[in-house]
Image (spheres, coloured by chain):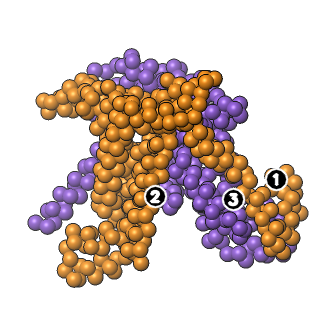
Chain colours: A orange, B purple
Amino acid sequence: MTSLFVEDSSPLAGISPAAVRGRRPRGIWLSAAALLAPSLVFLIAFTYWPIVRVLAESFVVGRFADHQAGLGNYQRLFADPHFARAAWNNAVYAAGTIVPSLCLALLFALALRETTRLNAVLRTLVVMPLLIPLVAAAALFTFILLPGDGLVDFYLARLGLGMVNWLGDPDLALGSIIAITVWKNTGYYMLFFLAGLAGVPQDLLDAATIDGAGAIRRFRAVTLPLLGPTFGFVLPIALLNALTQIDHVIMVTQGGPSDATNLLLYYIYQQAAQNYDTGLASSATVVSVAALLALSFISLRMLERGIHYES
Amino acid sequence: MRADWRLLCALLIAATAVLWAVPFLWMAMASLRPGVPADIASLTPAGPFGLSNFAEAWRSGSFPLWYLNTLLVAGGILVGQLVTITAAGYAFARLSFPGRDLLFAMFLLQLLLIPPLLIVPNLGTLVSLRLYDTLPGIMAPYFASAFGTFLMRQTFRAIPRDYEEAAMLEGASIPVLIQHVLVPLARPGLIAFAIISVTAHWNEFLWPLMAVSSPKNQVLTVGLASFASGAEAGSAWGIVAAGTFLVAGPLLVLFLVFQRRFVSSFVFSGIK
């Protein structure tokens, strides 16, 4: 028992037990402060302070001694055709990745929900891309989509087709990047739908069957409404992914050809790491984060509605 | 007629799922074929097979260093997080103090404002803390985890208070209580969190790419990016495949072995 009390090296040592047992408000407040301090130090340094800092820097015009406050960065940002292109691409990328991967994930979940040996193997195959880094996926797809010798063209050639420059053609490159993302993320979303489907009561489905509802009707009238909360929390995750998953863009296309795969975070990365334009990078960050917060707020409202529907 | 349709649908889904595995199948095949075969894209090659691509990848990349750095980063982040999230999770689960709910909401903000998004200001912070181009610099933004705090809060709440009260009567302080009473009971939650955290940071690319400049501090993903572009330039696709396997393999193997654990952890992670 004594070993339990050798705690002096702990950063949390020194909180009086009496403070908790006595439930004195001041004591509780001190305990809470000590327990939360380690987290708060890092949250302040790397979440809250950066927001203040990026907001402040977005209003600083001029890089050197003569800098002043103003809206110059935002004016430059909204006048920059590359930014407009990145924003538009990102909207296409979000819609193009979220809609297909959620539909596919739901289809997979519906088809593979019964745990047979075959289904377990098929589920594993769909989930596996989730485990590998996006740069590893990018390395594989660089070859798969390679014109001529690549995997897709190799098999298309057997059908008498081929030689498509999937990543080099401005009309196809964003679609190819989207395909990589869909391949990578569908399994993740499928896991949520599988968990959501497990929560659909079988007797409800049975009752619907007895009432003469076919499979499609059962899905639309029973299953889909009950999956509302699942959609509600998958959607913010998917939105966040659509804004932040750009590893393959950095590795494979570098935003090209001719800006076809430039996305918001890639634009920020370029301004910060290549052009050293902190003002532009900061204002682009502010706009992107604001858009993310707004969209997440909207989808959280949808989540609330989903829960109300259920109850 | 109906049965036919169902069979057709089942076959289509199964075929799509198999299609999902094609990149992995190609990775395995190409990595095992020495030299530069003309039909490197073939998924059903005739051979010969060998491990020379792995030897070549190992020689031309700095894999031992990258493995070490990745292990240090993912492990260091996890250790830091386990301290911060158990402490904060306990505070939010068990103590009632003014402003608790507001503070909790402030914590949750970090679910959206992840470090790669705040690259510009975070790099500035790293420079002023003299952490730029160091492994602790890669780790620092992740030491606090809103998701982990949330998870531990839920986990602690599910534990009956009786255990703690018995320990408190014996005079145990909060740190002792957390470490010796609650943490052992919260092990499933901690393991789930560990799996998610290690997977996320083993695979992360953009932040380590930005936070580090010298080759000696590179992690696996950053190393793979430069390694692969070099090998691709020489059309050495077998070596690219082998290098990719060296980076992605460890987690894939762990996943195949502990599949059930991984899956339940990932599903857990969605309850943000």
Disc on res. A10: 1
Image-based side of A224 in relation to A249, left or right: left
Tag 1 subunit? A
Which residue is drawn at the image coordinates 58% and 44% (left, top)?
A51
Give the crowd class for mark 1: few <14, some 14-19, many >=20 residues within 10 Å. few
Q: Amino acid at mark 3?
A: Ala
The quadrant in which residue A148 appears is top left
Which residue is drawn at the image coordinates 56% and 41% (left, top)?
A55
The quadrant in which residue B177 appears is bottom right
Kindly identify which residue carries mark 2.
Answer: A297
State which quarter of the image contains the C terminus of chain A.
bottom left
The quadrant in which residue A309 appears is bottom left
Q: Amino acid at mark 2?
A: Phe
Kindly identify which residue carries mark 3.
Answer: B88
Q: Is residue A302 above or below residue B120?
A: below
Cα gap from disc 1 to disc 3, whole angstroms: 15 Å
**A48 or B50, which is in the foreground?**
A48
Residue A183 x/y as whole percent: 35, 44
Q: Mark 3 or mark 2: which is in front?
A: 2
Mark 1 or mark 2: whose residue is earlier in sequence: 1
Marks 3 and 2: same chain? Answer: no
Tag 2 subunit? A
Marks 1 and 2: same chain? Answer: yes
Tag 3 subunit? B
Give the crowd class for mark 3: few <14, some 14-19, many >=20 residues within 10 Å. many
